Amino acid sequence: MAQKIPTRIYLSEDEMPKYWYNIRAVMKNKPDPILHPGTLNPVTQADMEHIFCKEAVRQELDDGTPLIPIPEGIQDFYRAYRPSALIRAYYLEKALGTPAEIYYKFEGTNTSGSHKLNSAGPQAYYAREEGLTSLTTETGAGQWGTAMAMACAFYGLDLTVYMVKVSSQQKPYRKAVMETYGAGVIPSPSDTTESGRKILETDPQTGGSLGCAISEAVETAVKTDKCRYVLGSVLNHVLLHQSVIGLEAKAALDKYGITPDIIIGCAGGGSNLGGLIAPFMGDKLSGALDARFIAVEPASCPSFTRGRYAYDFGDTAKTTPLIRMQTLGNGFIPSSNHAGGLRYHGMNPVLSRLYKDGLLEARAEIQTDVFDAAVQFMKVEGILPAPESSHAIKAAIDEALACKKNGEKKVILFGLTGTGYFDLSAYMAYNDKTLTDRVPTDAELEKGFSTIPAIPQNI
């Protein structure tokens, strides 16, 4: 008789990862170096320390150490909510009538409601250890801002959050949670910074973007004593911290001798996708695993599927170093879809390199189809998923139905990055059939591409 796999596979506290997994150390073709925008030379530790915490910079530039120890002070923070469960989606499998096995790694059981806490904790810890007293950051849908507010409260730091204006309007309760933790929340773009005022002069009615909010947060950080900027996605050290997701998922699957065939994650800046796939991609690169990896992005902000692989700024005001990535251009302003955490013009350089090398697939989904999948999942699995996570659900359902059509039994793993209880306005729009789909035209994309800096791209 076949072994019955538990609905929920839990790891013990002792099995929680003690190291982060650095996928760059095992990549044959590593991501291109981050460049100083003035000299076009690779950035140094000193170049970045005036913006980021020193240890975050060291991790950002380390592409040779496969396993980086997690300090005990961060493990203490993780123990409050980790390890998280790996869940077998038996009810979804039954509803689809598929021979596929579907598993999801659920990161929504902490108060922030998402995976973002996995990097917020380390970044706040390093800031405290460095003797800093405050931090600034940006947030799209609010998951990162909420997580950072929690982490700063835990480690005793002040926090200012620049929240994308349209998201602050769509998700007022996220703002309330951040403020309850003690953070200051400012809708972006705002008149509190020079970069914000310039953006508003150009477009007073703009709903903002993550690129705008990053500009304001960086400006405030560099002008404030004992303050640094922290980022919740895109950069390499963030993916490093998020590797606890993939390490736990792999350990849980290994307990029952399960090997995934397809691994799926939603993609905005790349943090959860990179964290989920990291140890599995390491096995693929070594020849120990033959699996497909799928990134799922919104059709309204298609940096993988319609973007360009180029050096670009990470923010609208062009204050950050230059990162070679899949990008729509730093001036691209995405439409106000409800997956606010995926409204970013670029993609992490590691994932961009894997995509360029054909190791990572990508697809773009329209908003109404994503919410159809979210509701189908919710009705059988009993979890209200975040709009961002629902992109991965859509692809997992599609792959499971393909297995049904082809008579194939494959193992599908996807990341359920968080819950959607702060996104009920989106579900209300879905129920009222007022949810719309907005896909940028080629002309709109060209306008974004025109903001990519005119520098040699073969540096």
Image (cartoon, rainbow, N blue to C red):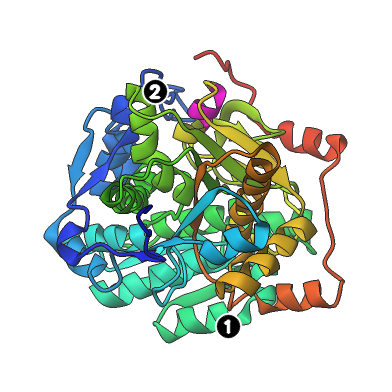
Q: Which region of the structure is painted magenta?
A: 352-356
As drawn, 4 above or below 433: above
Quadrant that contains the N terminus: bottom left
Residue type indicated by callout 2? Lys
State the residue in front, 215 or 287.
287
Residue under label 2: 30
| Magenta part, dominant SS | helix
At 27% across and 68% down in the image, what residue appears?
133
Residue type indicated by callout 1? Tyr
Number of marks in the rendered image: 2
The tag on residue 173 is: 1
As drawn, 174 above or below 60: below
Real-space CA distance between mark 2 and mark 1, rounded to the nearest whole angstrom? 40 Å
Residue 286, given in percent of the width and then of the height, sits at: 32, 23
Mark 2: which secondary structure? loop
As drawn, 27 above or below 273: above
Around disc 2, counting alpha carbons within 10 Å, would you say few (fewer than 14), some (14 to 19), or many (20 or more)?
some
Is 98 placed left or right of 352 in the picture? right
